[in-house]
Image: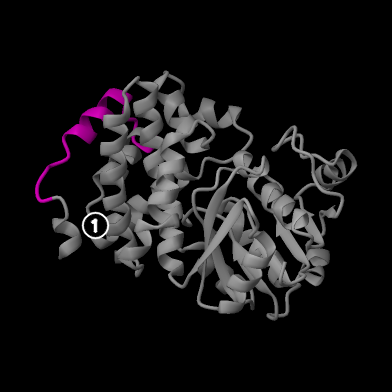
Amino acid sequence: MTESLKVGVIGAGSWGTTLAKISAENGHPTLLWARREEQANRIAEERCNTEYLPNIDLPLNLETTADLERIAQFSDLLVLVVPSHGLRGIARQLGEFVDGSQCLVHATKGLEQGTHRRMSEVIREETCLRKIGVIAGPNLARELAQSGPAGTLVASHYDEVFRKGHAAFGNHYFRVYWGHDVVGAEVGGAFKNVVALAAGVLSGLGYGENSRSLLMTRGLSEMARLGTAMGGSLVTFGGMAGIGDLIATCSSSLSRNFQVGSRLAAGDTLPQIQADMKMVAEGVKTSLAVREFAEQHHIDLPIAGAIHRLLHEGGSVPELLADLMAIPTGAEFAELAR
């Protein structure tokens, strides 16, 4: 360990708890913020987040709080891990307590509906923080909480953010890479959830690896199309935050978005699925933001459009499959070469 940090993780879902666990195991004093005081107290007493990450023991140097002012004053590195639809509100509250000196990385994979803002843009609008980065990659929380080998990307315009992110989370089982393309990392992390919904549908219908591979490769193409239109680098989508995250999310039943798609294929309704799930499947709301942005900027995203019709326009699973197989063919990389 090259640097001792005070790490404050805001968000006590499965992913936030996992990142807090890794930081504490790496020897850093770590404070985990939960929205509800009773949840914070229960995690501290049980040394386990039984609500979102059951059967995973948490280190003794991981403390909890429900006080945003305390975590802002405590932290050298802030880690924001809340759902995209609630991030602006939390960032606005946090903005009352930070002084701009801290580094912040977020691990939220979504776009804001209505504004189409990326999460780093929302944070900049609501706080005085400028040393901002994003954690993005093939990171299924439970596997990492069990110390399964994995890697991720910390993208930021500030090298200090990467250094602190690497110090907080890098270790023998979690390899942390760096990059400067914040836009590409954020778009990749958000869009892969939309593709994962479709992957879950195909799996739920009993289709195999040929179908999944077709979906993922064409989904990667759409990810790159959207990401470059928003200002990201094409190269980013061939790395951790692009194809890496896409593979993990489209291939695992641990993925919440994959689970939603699979249950839709089984005949469950979206409201029923959402009522049953404790955690947010970001792809559902991201599909709305992506659709809005694509229409405004005339970007052809047929897979994203098919998912939008299924989720928000009363479409059916058979219609989704028909839509996917009716996407026009042509030169494979024509749209990326323009």
Kind of residue at disc 1: Ile
Dividing the picture into quadrants, the one containing residue 38 is top right
Q: Nearer the viewer, residue 207 or 225?
A: 207
In the image, is residue 188 above or below residue 163? above
Residue positioned 58% across, 68% down in the render: 123
Outermost residue toward the left?
330
* Left or right relative to 41: residue 244: left
**Residue 116 seen in render:** no
The residue beneath circle 1 is 299
Q: Quadrant of the C terminus?
A: bottom left
Tell me where residue 275 appears, x and y as whole percent.
59, 29
Dividing the picture into quadrants, the one containing residue 279 is top right
In the image, is residue 47 above or below residue 314? below
Magenta residues (range): 311-331
Residue positioned 66% across, 71% down in the render: 164
**Residue 86 seen in render:** yes
Outermost residue toward the front?
172
How many callouts does the rendering have? 1
| 176 in the magenta segment | no
Tell me where residue 234 appears, x and y as whole percent.
31, 64
* Left or right relative to 91: residue 59: right
Tell me where residue 305 appears, x and y as whole percent.
29, 43
Tell me where residue 187 appears, x and y as whole percent.
41, 58
* Left or right relative to 238: residue 28: right
Residue positioned 46% across, 46% down in the render: 285
Q: Residues within 10 Å of mark 1 (few under 14, many from 20)?
A: some
Outermost residue toward the right?
45
Q: Nearer the viewer, residue 152 or 99?
A: 152
Q: Secondary structure at mark 1?
A: loop
Give the color scheme: rainbow, by chain, secondary structure or one colour.
one colour
| 317 in the magenta segment | yes
Q: Quadrant of the N terminus?
A: bottom right
